[in-house]
Image (cartoon, rainbow, N blue to C red):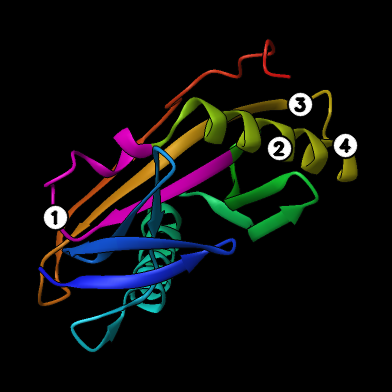
């Protein structure tokens, strides 16, 4: 673990490197800078590539289960939904979570209440934009766990993974 000298908003600070993060103590706050190069690898790019691979696997997996993929990476000013699909007469908003290990729990466990709120708001925009407001819809999750060599360790569909909470602001 090495020391690093950093200037934060005109103030001097000393930091310690640990793992792939840089922790900076400054006026009682801890800033965590991530997405930087670590061990010669671009951590941010690897994470994006892992997510994209997981989404491609999820698309193929859902198609085999009879889903029709209507949109990938649907974006609105309020956020993004990884996949929008049709399962019979139900519009399904799918969040895909991919991990390389279970060190921090199952992939689906990383979906926070804020993320659920963002998915809900984006889903409502999709429904309105596509005149689907009166139809059935639900929120599924595809959980992908990859082996270090890139092989699939676990691929799971969780139907009705969460219910829309209309108390979100």
Badge number at residue 135: 3
Q: Residues within 10 Å of mark 2 (few under 14, many from 20)?
A: many
Nearer the observer: mark 1 or 3; the answer is 1
Q: Nearer the viewer, residue 58 or 76?
A: 76
Q: Give the mark, 2 or 3, whose residue is nearer the N terminus.
A: 2
Q: Is residue 100 magenta?
A: yes
Measured as percent of width and height from the top left, residue 111 is found at 42, 35
Q: In whole angstroms, how far apart are the C-alphas of marks 4 and 3?
A: 11 Å
Q: Residues within 10 Å of mark 1 (few under 14, many from 20)?
A: some
Residues in magenta?
93-110
Residue ID for mark 1: 101
Measured as percent of width and height from the top left, residue 132 is found at 82, 35
Q: Is residue 90 visible?
A: no
Circles 2 and 4 in contact, beta carbons < 8 Å = no
Residue ID for mark 2: 123
Q: In whole angstroms, how far apart are the C-alphas of marks 1 and 3?
A: 37 Å
User: In the figure, 103 relative to 8: above or below?
Assistant: above
Identify the secondary structure beneath mark 4.
Answer: helix
Q: Give the mark, 1 or 3, whose residue is nearer the N terminus.
A: 1
């Amino acid at each position: 673990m090495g020391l690093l000298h950093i200037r934060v908003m005109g103030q001097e600070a000393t930091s310690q490197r640990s793992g792939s993060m840089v922790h900076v103590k400054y006026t009682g706050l801890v800033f965590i800078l991530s997405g930087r190069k670590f061990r010669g690898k671009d951590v941010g790019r690897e994470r994006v590539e892992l997510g994209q691979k997981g989404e491609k696997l999820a698309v193929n997996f859902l198609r085999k289960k009879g889903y029709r993929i209507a949109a990938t990476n649907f974006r609105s000013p309020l956020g993004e939904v990884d996949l929008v699909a049709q399962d019979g007469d139900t519009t399904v908003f799918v969040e895909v979570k991919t991990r390389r290990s279970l060190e921090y729990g199952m992939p689906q466990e990383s979906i926070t209440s804020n993320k659920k709120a963002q998915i809900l708001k984006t889903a409502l925009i999709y429904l309105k934009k596509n005149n689907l407001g009166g139809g059935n819809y639900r929120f599924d999750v595809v959980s992908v766990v990859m082996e270090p060599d890139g092989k699939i360790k676990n691929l799971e569909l969780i139907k009705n993974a969460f219910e829309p909470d209309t108390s979100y602001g």
